[in-house]
Image (cartoon, rainbow, N blue to C red):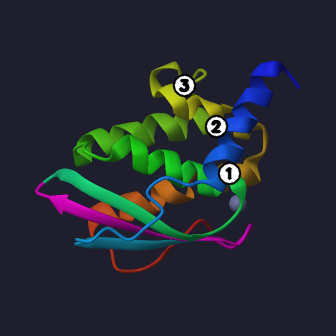
């Protein structure tokens, strides 16, 4: 375990203990639920979309440290972004955690999740909130399941 990995673990633990945007925004017009039966992670993502812009975002629910930290950092990153920008981030994030891309240099803080590629079950924890965000952006009604 390198020092870098320890730093990454600290970031993930800090976000899971004090998740950002862990709330239902006052105005919400798109909502989606996500569930990862393998781990038991379950979250609801709330969006306030104005046209294609994510004016506000929040999430609620419960799950492991990785899923919660990922949801927390996701909300911070996509708030104020357009739908297309958020989807591009998800694409890059997904490539990084599935090991198809480098170390996520272009993903900034999300690089802390690069280590989950070694643990396929954890990839589902790390991407759950993003899949749920995608579903909310698409206006889908059914809950997202990673299975
Ligand atoms: Zn999990």
- Image quadrant of ligand 1 equals bottom right
Residue where numbered disc 2 is placed:
113
Residue at 70% from the left image edge and 32% from the top image edge? 8
Q: Are marks 2 and 1 in contact (CB under 8 Å)?
A: yes
Q: In which quarter of the image is the N terminus?
A: top right
Q: Does the magenta stretch include residue 31?
A: no
Find numbered disc 2 in the image and state the secondary structure of the residue it sits on: helix
Find numbered disc 3 in the image and state the secondary structure of the residue it sits on: loop
Residue where numbered disc 3 is placed:
104
In the image, residue 10 lies at what x, y percent? Answer: 73, 37
- Vertical arrangement, residue 126 with respect to residue 141, above or below: above
Q: Residues within 10 Å of mark 1 (few under 14, many from 20)?
A: many
Residue furthest to the front in view is 18
Q: Is residue 53 visible?
A: yes
Start-end of magenta stretch: 36-51
Q: Are marks 3 and 2 in contact (CB under 8 Å)?
A: yes
Q: Is residue 5 left or right of residue 11?
A: right
Q: Quadrant of residue 90?
A: top left
Q: Nearer the viewer, residue 77 or 142?
A: 77
Instruction: Name the N-terminal-most of marks 3 and 1.
Output: 1
Q: Does the residue labelled 2 lie within 8 Å of ligand 1?
A: no
In the image, residue 11 lies at what x, y percent? Answer: 66, 37
Residue at 34% from the left image edge and 73% from the top image edge? 31
Residue where numbered disc 1 is placed:
66
Q: Foreground mark, 3 or 1?
A: 1
């Amino acid at each position: 375990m390198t020092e870098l990995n320890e730093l990454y673990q600290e970031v993930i633990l800090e976000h899971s203990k004090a998740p950002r945007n862990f709330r239902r925004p006052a105005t919400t017009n798109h909502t989606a639920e996500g569930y990862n039966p393998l781990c038991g992670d379950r979250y609801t993502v709330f969006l306030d979309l104005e046209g294609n812009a994510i004016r506000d975002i929040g999430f609620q629910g419960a799950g492991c440290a990785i899923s919660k930290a990922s949801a927390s950092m996701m909300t911070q990153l996509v708030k104020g972004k357009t739908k297309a920008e958020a989807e591009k981030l998800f694409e890059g994030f997904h490539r990084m955690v599935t090991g198809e891309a480098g170390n996520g240099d272009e993903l900034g803080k999300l690089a802390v999740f690069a280590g989950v590629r070694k643990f396929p079950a954890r990839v589902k924890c790390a991407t759950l909130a993003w899949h749920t965000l995608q579903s909310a952006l698409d206006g889908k009604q059914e809950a997202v399941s990673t299975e």
